[in-house]
Amino acid sequence: MRKWWQGLLVILALTCGLWGLAKPAQAASRRVLIVYDALNPKQQGQKKLVAVQRLLASAGVKTQTEQLTTYRAGQLTTRRYQGVVTLNNWSAGHLKNPAFIRDRDTFTGQQLHIGPGLDAAETGRLRAKRVTVRHQQFLLKHQRNWQLLPFSEDVTLLKTRKGARNFGTLTTQRTSLADHPYGTVVGTQGYLPYLEPQGLSLLVAMQTVATLFGRQRAQAPLLTITGVTPYSDLKRVRRLAQHLAADGIPFALSTTTVANNTSMRAFTRFTATLRYVERHHGVIFLQAPVVGAANAQSRNTLEQVMVAELNQLGQRQVIPVGISAPAYWNQDRTLQRYGLQRASDVLLLPNPTTTAFVQRDNLGATHRTTWYGVTWQSLQTVRNGQIQQVTPALPMAVTVQLPTSAKQETALLQQLRHTHITWYAPQKQMRTRLLSASATFGYHKGIYYLNGSPVKIRTRATGVPNYHFERKNFVALSGYFKVQGWILMAFFVITTIVLGIFLFLGRRIYRRMFMRK
Amino acid sequence: MKRFKQFRLTAWQAFTRQVSPAMLATILAGLVVGFLLFVPPLRGLADDGTFPQILANNGLYRLSGYQTTTYVNPQLGIMRYFNELRGTSFTAQTLFIQVAILVNKLVHSQTVFDVRFLGLTYTGPYLGRIYLLTKALTQPYRRIRSYFLAVAVVLVFADAAFILSFNSFYATPVMVIGMLYVVATTLLVARLRTMNWRLVIGFFGGVALLVTATPQNGLLVLCFVIASGGFFFVVTRGSRWLWLLAGLLMLLILGGLSYTSLSSEQRAMNRYQSFTHGVLTQDTDASQSLEHSGISPQYGLMKDEDYYPTAFTAQRPSSRSVQRHLIQRYTGVWVSRYYLQHPRQFLTLLDLAASDMMMTQNKSVGDYQKGAGKAPGAQVTLFTSFSAAAGSFFPERFAFNVLLVVALLMIFAVGVYNDLRAQRVASVVRFFLVCGLLLIFISVPIMAIIGGGTTALAQRLLMVPLSIDMVLLIFLADMLNHRLWHADDAETEV
């Protein structure tokens, strides 16, 4: 009787547990489908697609990217997706997939249309009127910031009604054309007439995406120094950290490191510099290594490399708060799982010119905080406008390259001093967690944690096993061989000298042996 | 019993009348080559990753199912349309490959290239050179020891370590053929009474093959200029001196062109790996030894990294910062100064080179075609006795090599002294040749360590075993023919 009760209890508990587990899991695993028509390199379509992927990742939404031609009928209506993003890069291509249009029209989740080709049904759902404008140069205004946009071929703008939430204003010099909104959100529908992945456009697009997907997290941008490697000019890194600290500018530093040769003095020097940064109110992001070649072993190698790098740094009280990587790492199963997934904070940087995928799956994952890395230049150039005040709607990191000359260094410091941007201060707000295989790194409001206990950062590393190159291992009989070598050497030298003396004494007889008379 | 003895004698006489030692060597070498290259299953050397560039350069492409490192690819595609990579770099190998493609197109197919046609193209000149070399070593005798010498030549140069590369796109066959050419012609010139210009032209042709076989060989032209020094003792008339000088000048230019034909990327790669696999290989802290050297000690952390990283790395070696702060500063002068300051490390590296140099068989890649029932990367074990023996018994110390060079030079110098007194030139020509070969023997390991560190060392040292094998063969032959100490008056003809 008792057994029967117990069995029922176990089953009940299991069902409850599974149900409890399944519910949030399903909600979290619902992705947003990004459907793009073509990459269209001429219009930098690749960059735009990556920007959309990164925006959604920063908004904390998992994504799946699909090309229009590979979209299967019924894919959207399976309730596996919480939203859909239509990205049109190539209006002249007139690429169509009727199944997609049909499914999208019956889809009830969030919808965002980016670029040209907004159809009547979508316009209807946005409760707006389409206005097509040809050959115009627009000025994007948002609060006190502005950006001058390049000449556009064909832009579909919206005349929205009441109830629509608009972001940014597009104005032209032509007075006859009224101002139109840039980003529009009406209920679960969103629209962006174009996407320029830099400057003010990006910031406004960010706000639109954040509003549409309900993940507003307005916070100051994080100043991040990138391009640091163990081979960088470490004095410059120190100087930069010192100046930034003196000016009260909080910052992060994204650096790669090595997994091998860590017993060299060069590595001690490198980690000492990173500790110096930590002591000067800088936090460290560990930058993912460069992928040289991808093969079947990459998974294991990456795991080993990442763990070795983290452990070698952790042993020397360099405690990274997160991992930074090129954006494509988030679209690759292996790189994402063995590289990024171990960190709560991930900083996605712009892609390099060549991307080396290991196991591309086009499934964008999310992390507790995914920082969107934007270069400082892209916010500063004349074309992109002078951005006075930035409060991005999503976590954003403004990246600056480590200067390579003294001139660049002073220029950068000047610019940073004179800007009005308030920077994100990790010491006040940040809370992160990072796992290596054996250790847990933590950071909470200026205090570093290693395996849960707080760590004091000193100028010198503590607790590092000291490795002496010079110390020789004891080898039995090595002394004997050494002595034997010396004896042999002495023997040969003496013999040679004696022979030489004999040769000198008997040189006439010797010569006569060869000389013919 | 007596009749049997008589019969044996007449049989031997008949044999020597019909088959000269040179003929015997050629037949034996031909049998070995024929068996290794053309009797199924197909044998050769698999691609170690360097083929695609050579293939593209010659208008060939990889067919689907192309294998690397494990199995040999018997078939390749012949490009039919425009090839933008054609002729981007010129090596002597291109000549042979183009001839092979031509023959293939005439006989076999317009679209598919069978690698055995390349083997065949190499075999022709190779057998001819074996004939010439054996002749040079044994002429004019037909004694038992002459036939023994012929067998020795076959053992050394018809070793599978060399022959297998005929069915591949490595530069090894070109170097083997070139070396046979150079030595055979020089020795014949030495033994002839009158100057045979065909032989001198042959010598120049051989040197041209050798120095253009790979860009690294370009510098060896200096050694061959020394090796040809004896010709100036043979040629007595002034106008002919000028011809010789003009020929040598052409060779120098060719060598210089060959050496400078490396692309900037290849040069950067050599420099980088010379740094990470050479300068940084030491037991002590590599980063400390870089201090105050003009290169940031932080680069010490690059120890053991490759230019084309096989997995993950902290910074791409082709990035601008590495190019500017490491590769541009890492010049020949820098390396030489570094090794002068760290002689012990340099000697250790040279010892490593000495232990690698006799490993002529490329064991890192497979020798069989897929489907031959062999394991991936399986090695041929037939006809490898000489390379195996040399690889395991040759002393692995650079100091030994230096002593060997001194001893050999002293021995051959005696002949020069005696010949000059007797107004003969044979030993003088031979001495210059040996000098040149021994200079290769000593200088190639040094250049290899400075120029590229320890990466793929055995393959970059190929000229070393070739030259020492030649010197030892000359030594053996002259000892058996009793002309080590002075030339004899035996008649020699071509």
Image (tube, coloured by chain):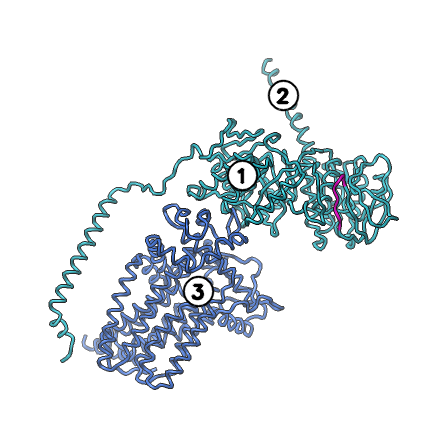
According to the picture, the residue beneath numbered tag 2 turns out to be A13
Quadrant in the rendering for residue B411 = bottom left
Residue B140, x across and y down, in percent: 28, 80
Label 3 neighbour load within 10 Å: few <14, some 14-19, many 20+: many
Amino acid type, label 3: Gln
Residue A507 highlighted magenta (yes or no): no
Residue at left 44%, top 44%? A266
Task: Work out whether A203 lies above or below B130.
Answer: above
Residue A242, numbered circle:
1
Seen at 37% across and 72% down, the residue is: B224
Look at 70% across and 34% down and name the residue there: A218
Res. B131 image quadrant: bottom left
Give the structural element (helix, strand or loop) at label 1: helix
Q: Is mark 3 on a helix, strand or loop?
A: helix
Residue A184: x %, y % from top left? 80, 40
Q: Nearer the viewer, residue A206 or A46?
A: A206
Q: Give the range drawn in magenta.
A: A142-149
Q: Mark 2 lies on which chain?
A: A
Image position of B74 (left or right of B128): right
Residue type at tag 1: Gln
Q: The blue chain is which one?
A: B
Q: With B220 as the anchor, is A228 left or right in this view?
A: right
The quadrant of the rendering that contains the C terminus of chain B is bottom left
Give the x, y percent position of residue B455: 43, 55
Q: Which chain is cyan?
A: A
Q: In this view, does A127 lie above or below B105?
A: above
